[in-house]
């Protein structure tokens, strides 16, 4: 079985997914669409696919599925359009910045018995996946505490901040999903603190660049998330899970894993410089998982509901900072 794909959006993340799709032997990239013709043509030239309009991809008989990499405010509308057109949908996070709009979109997906997978790629990172496998194998007993560190090498342009939905919905949302993935229970309470320590312009745009979040489940399991828009030493991505019988963790990854020892001491190469290289294997694995789901080998996961819950946790964190209190997830969801 070869799944024939249409790619909607030829920007930075679109390029990442174009590489993942064309690198899978069970996938074919048939067409790409973008509001900027030159961007679409660049991908078409690189991978030998067509440049088409979104409308043409929507009605195309030679396309089975689409990967949505367009701006966030278009995601829900495009999901609905392509589900109605009978095509499977893989959509980058988030589905929308509004919980109400996400719920409405998921109703349409259910009504048309559509297939929707949301792009929380970190679940597919082999190192993070191995942590989850050890939890499932009982290596550390019952999960008690999770620590997630996620720090970007640098802040995005200020003009992006205004349309991102804020750090909790744009950046921390990946960590909310990872916390759920590792805790094994749904989060019921969210506490958070936030500050502007990196760039005053981010604060002037109404956002934060440095945040800490604590999550708690009904049984008392806890997760702590540390985010910063600045890590001078590279793309900092670590997780640690403490259980009743031990601990399992995943360290930072480097393009080359070596260590040099000499009279000056011990040195190691720098970390990856951002998500495009750090999570290459994860992007490939999530597309492979999507294709497997279309072949009837498991469900499309993370699902639209996973996207909904991650956004709810982000909304709860926003509320927790604004009101300086712990927020119950039931208050926002």
Image: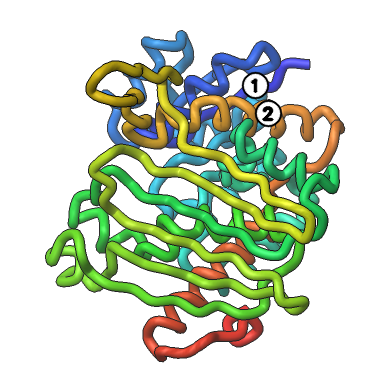
Q: Is residue 43 left or right of residue 58?
A: left
Rendering quarter of residue 103: bottom right
Colour mode of the rendering: rainbow
Question: Which mark, by number, is residue 64?
Answer: 2
- Viewer-nearest residue: 288 or 249: 249
Image position, residue 73 (x, y; %): 42, 57
Q: Is residue 153 left or right of residue 244?
A: left
**Residue at the image position 27 percent from the left and 69 percent from the top:** 207
Image position, residue 203 (x, y; %): 19, 70
Residue labelled with disc 1 = 4
Rendering quarter of residue 13: top left
Question: Which mark, by number, is residue 193?
Answer: none
Q: Does residue 327 lie above or below 168 as drawn? A: below
**Residue at the image position 22 percent from the left and 69 percent from the top:** 196
Secondary structure at badge 2 equals: loop
Rendering quarter of residue 10: top left
Image position, residue 54 (x, y; %): 47, 36
Pick out the residue farthest to the front: 263
**Residue at the image position 46 percent from the left and 53 percent from the top:** 149
Q: In the rendered image, which quarter contains the C terminus?
A: bottom right
- Viewer-nearest residue: 89 or 15: 15
Evaluate whether residue 285 shows in this view.
yes
Secondary structure at badge 1 equals: strand
Evaluate whether residue 104 shows in this view.
no
């Amino acid at each position: 079985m070869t799944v024939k794909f249409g790619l909607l959006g030829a920007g930075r993340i679109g390029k990442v997914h174009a590489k993942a799709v064309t690198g899978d032997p069970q996938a074919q990239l048939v067409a790409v669409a973008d509001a900027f013709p030159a961007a679409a043509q660049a991908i078409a030239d690189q991978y030998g696919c067509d440049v088409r309009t979104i409308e043409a991809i929507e009605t195309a008989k030679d396309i089975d599925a689409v990967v949505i990499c367009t701006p966030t405010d278009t995601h829900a509308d495009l999901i609905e359009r392509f589900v109605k057109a009978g095509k499977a949908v893989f959509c980058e996070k988030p589905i929308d910045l509004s919980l109400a709009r996400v719920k409405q979109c998921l109703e349409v997906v259910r009504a048309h018995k559509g297939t929707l997978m949301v792009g929380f790629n970190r679940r597919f990172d082999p190192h993070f996946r191995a942590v989850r496998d050890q939890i499932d194998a009982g290596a550390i007993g019952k999960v008690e505490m999770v620590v997630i560190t996620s720090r970007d090498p640098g802040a995005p342009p200020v003009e992006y901040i205004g349309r991102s939905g804020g750090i909790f919905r744009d950046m921390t949302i990946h960590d909310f999903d990872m916390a759920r993935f590792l805790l094994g229970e749904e989060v019921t309470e969210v506490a958070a603190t936030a500050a502007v320590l990196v760039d005053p312009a981010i604060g002037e745009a109404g956002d934060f660049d440095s945040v800490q979040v604590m999550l708690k489940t009904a049984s008392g399991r806890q997760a702590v998330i540390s985010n910063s828009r600045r890590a001078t030493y590279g793309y900092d991505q670590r997780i640690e899970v403490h259980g009743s019988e031990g601990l399992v963790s995943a360290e930072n990854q480097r393009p080359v894993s070596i260590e040099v020892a000499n009279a000056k001491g011990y040195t190691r190469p720098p970390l990856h410089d951002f998500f495009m290289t750090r999570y290459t294997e994860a992007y490939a694995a999530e597309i492979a998982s999507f294709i497997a789901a279309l072949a009837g080998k498991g469900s499309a996961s993370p699902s639209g509901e996973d996207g909904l819950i991650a956004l709810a946790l982000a909304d709860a964190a926003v509320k927790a900072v604004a009101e300086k209190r712990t927020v119950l997830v039931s208050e926002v969801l």
